[in-house]
Amino acid sequence: MLTQIKGLHHVTSMAASAQENSDFFTKTLGLRRVKKTVNFDDPEVYHLYYGDQIGTPGSVMTYFPFPHIAKGRPGAGEVGETSFAIPEGTLDYWQERLASRGVAGLSEHELWGEKRLRFKGPDGDAFSLVEVKNDPRRGWAVTEVDEDKAVKGFHGATLRLTDPGATRELLSFMGYEEVDRKGESSRFAISGGNDGADVVELEIAPSADRARLGAGSVHHIAFAVEDRAAQLEVRKALIDTGYQVTPVIDRDYFWAIYFRAPGGVLFEIATNEPGFDRDEDTRHLGEALKLPTRYEPYRDQISRRLVPIRD
Ligand code: ZN
């Protein structure tokens, strides 16, 4: 069993509109946009990152907004719901806040002994806010959402699968422990994670069709390791277990490796180093367009093709 994984690092999804996406995460959910860069494989598309003050791993929701992308079709083999932690006693506040801003799909649930508010993102993305006791993380305090109510970061994510068997094994290998089970659904948690962001749930939908990737779908889910040395250990262990893992890729703010989990979900292992403040003053994170070095010579061209985002 691996001991290097520290819970979630980030979740990356697809959106249709960069402006709508930025407004939703910064103004409605009150996260901080910590980076405005481009998709490193397709620099005509933004890559937007939202999180806490500095984009602490475990708090970072990221998006590729493709202007003409079709909506995704929910199904099996994808992340079904991404959940954020909120302080205990703030669910009513969030219910009112999201309702007053016209957020779709609001419904309250009691699940795994926790209070959960489900809602939809601008492209139908499935999210929830979960009241978590004694979460030590500090949320991003903005004018509209006080720090004592702010989203603290991820709580976890739900993988929707037709068959949980191999994924259960993989999560256990990664250091997760099954802490609860209801029928075929189960909840895994990891201790010693990024101070939270430590839950993965499995939702079993045996007859579901395969999900179709599009706006509102999660592209991949990234798990955290402290540094590059730990990442290499994890990479070797996964390869020894039979997984096909990519080489280490420099994403400027972390190093990444990717592999396909047995149920079809794309997993990434990302390093906590060097972080989102490596190339910007923390007071101005996410304001300027940052480009990887290889695209710097084409900054003018790239900027002209991106629709500016109004803050
Ligand atoms: Zn990623």
Image (cartoon, helix red, strand yellow):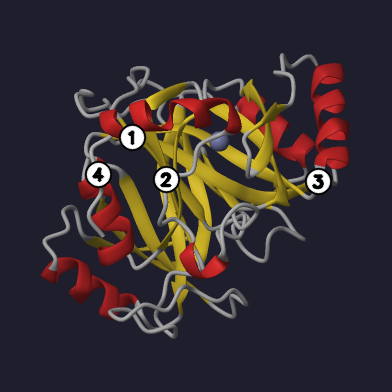
Q: Mark 3 points at which residue?
A: 227
Mark 1 = which residue?
303
Instruction: Give the mark nearest the N terminus, 3 or 4.
Output: 3
Q: Residue at x 32, y 57 (%)?
A: 25
Helix, strand or loop at disc 2? loop
Q: Residue 280 occupies which quadrant of the picture?
A: bottom right
Q: Marks 1 and 4, how far apart in space?
A: 8 Å
Q: Does the residue labelled 3 lie within 8 Å of ligand 1?
A: no
Q: Mark 2 points at which residue?
A: 289
Q: How far apart are marks 3 and 4 (CA)?
A: 34 Å
Graded by Cα atoms within 10 Å as few (under 14), some (14 to 19) or many (20 or more), the crowding at tag 4 reads few
Amino acid type assigned to the residue bearing label 2 in the image? Leu
The CA distance from mark 4 to mark 2 is 10 Å
Is 198 or 141 nearer to us in this picture? 141
Within 10 Å of the Cα at label 1, are there few (<14), some (14-19), or many (20+) other Cα atoms?
Answer: some
State the CA–CA distance, disc 2 to disc 3: 26 Å
C-alpha gap between disc 3 and disc 1: 32 Å
Q: Nearer the viewer, mark 2 or mark 3?
A: 2
Residue 164 x %, y %: 57, 29
At x 72%, y 58%, the residue is 193
Please name the amino acid that badge 4 sits on: Pro
